[in-house]
Amino acid sequence: MTESIQLCTFFVGDLHCGLAVQHVQEILRHQELTPVPLAPRGVTGLLNLRGEVVTGIDLRYVLDFDQRRENDEPSNVIIRTSEGVVSLLVDTIGDVLDVPASTFEPPPRTLSARARSQVRGVFKLPLGLLLELDIDRITEIGSAQEARPN
């Protein structure tokens, strides 16, 4: 019997990405975020999630894509981390997939250095690569990144 891993998937630009389902709390349609002055790049703002203040991190920045167009509304993947709850802003929600653990490989060199540093590895699937993101790396975006200009 082949061991498999269950991933919640989504798209950022042309990348098919995923996170282990045990880290995902819920998926939400577009939610308004309150901007935070001088927040680190990639931190889009704060979300009030049933009384809990949640930081919104835009995966387009994290994975080295251009900014989202003004009328494009992201979806929110709400994840649980050791530091608390975080909202990851993604372009499109995918499916929950069972992927064979045997297809896991290191991140490809074709990704930008910044994107590659945020990816645990990839799964080779019949229709292409599925990138498993590193939650710990993504959520430290605010600690060492440059501040947003005024």
Image (tube, rainbow, N blue to C red):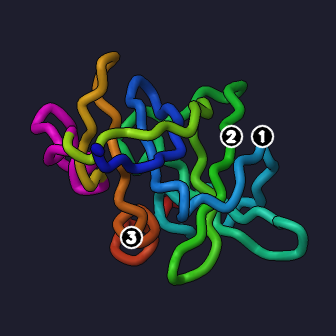
Quadrant housing residue 51: bottom right
Q: Earlier in the sequence, mark 3 or mark 1?
A: 1
Residue placed farthest to the left in the image? Answer: 109
Name the spot of residue 79 as percent of width and height, x first: 60, 63
Residue placed farthest to the right in the image? Answer: 50
Query: Measuring 61% from the left and 66% from the top, which residue is drawn there?
Result: 86
2 vs 112, nearest the viewer: 2
Question: Amino acid under label 3?
Answer: Asp
Q: Earlier in the sequence, mark 1 or mark 2?
A: 1
73 lies left or right of 124: right
139 lies left or right of 36: left
The reply to whether discs 1 and 2 touch (Cβ–Cβ < 8 Å) is yes
111 vs 143, nearest the viewer: 111
Number of residues whose C-alpha sits closer than 10 Å to that of mark 2, classed few (under 14), some (14–19) or many (20 or more): some
- For label 3, the SS is helix
Q: CA distance from mark 1 to mark 2?
A: 5 Å
Name the spot of residue 74 as percent of width and height, x first: 66, 37
